[in-house]
Amino acid sequence: MEPWETARHWLSAATSVTVLTGAGISAESGVPTFRGPGGLWRNQRPEDLATPAAFTRDPLRSWEWYNWRRGIIATVQPNAGHLALARIEERSAQFTLVTQNVDGLHDRAGSRNILKVHGDIWTLRCTQCARAWQDLRPALPELPPRCECGAVARPGVVWFGEGLPEDVWSEAVLAARACDVFLLVGTSAVVYPAAGLAELARSHGAKVVEINIEDTPLSAHVDLSWRARASEALPRLVE
């Protein structure tokens, strides 16, 4: 039996589906990854820009990088993998999409029940009053942007050294425990705690399907490891 046939059979019998997506699915749309060849900006590592300390030290430079990223993301479109996940959601009695991506491509593809464990690049959050709001303009007119209270705003993403939002993470854990099928799509499976969701799902009886172009640390520990691009594999599940 072909991988897509096995995965589609499991999906057809499932009442609850949970998905975890990583940078791989967005890279297929043209979004640069942190660790890939396009991961550097002005000869600086993202890990040296996306930290609370870096923002405190130089909020303008940090925001120049995020503004650059927003501009790139605004030029790309959801791919066939994003669109297929939205269709799987429509067909599922219970569906949760957990994503490590901050680009908003799942929203644009039509997915609804999304848990953004690393935040959203289109969300801004005040550093003083904690007010959060969305600004979908590709380039912000003022850097660094400010809240209506006058304080500097930060990107609404999770930086290195910060914990995941507790409410979002709690929902993700519940979804992993409750699902019948867990799809692991385009993630290197090295960033924890998100990578642990697949192991949690399998320990609670779910069938875990990995879709990735290369082996990951979880490949030997899932029920089906499928070497394919998300944009090619996921549409096969909704044909």
Image: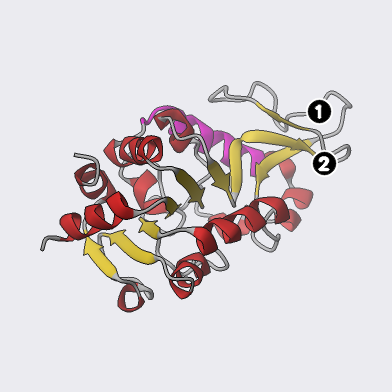
Q: Is residue 213 magenta?
A: no
214 to the left or right of 22:
left
Q: Which mark is residue 147?
A: 1
Displayed quadrant of residue 73 = top left
The x and y percentages for residue 223 are: 30, 71
Q: Is residue 61 visible?
A: no
Using a 10 Å C-alpha cutoff, classify the residue at mark 1 as few (fewer than 14 neighbours), some (14 to 19) or many (20 or more): some
Magenta segment's dominant SS is helix
Mark 1 and mark 2 in contact? Answer it, CB < 8 Å.
yes
Q: Nearer the viewer, residue 154 or 13?
A: 13
Q: Is residue 207 above or below residue 167?
A: below
Residue at (70, 61) in percent of width and height? 163
Amino acid carrying mark 2 in the image = Thr
Q: Which mark is residue 127?
A: 2
Displayed quadrant of residue 108 = top left
125 to the left or right of 215:
right
Using a 10 Å C-alpha cutoff, classify the residue at mark 2 as few (fewer than 14 neighbours), some (14 to 19) or many (20 or more): some
The x and y percentages for residue 58 are: 74, 47
Residue at (71, 52) in percent of width and height? 167
Q: Which residues are magenta?
A: 62-77
Residue at (87, 27) in percent of width and height? 150
Q: Is residue 178 visible?
A: yes
- Which quarter of the image is occupied by the C terminus? top left
Q: Nearer the viewer, residue 84 or 192?
A: 84
Residue at (36, 33) in percent of width and height? 78
Amino acid carrying mark 1 in the image = Cys
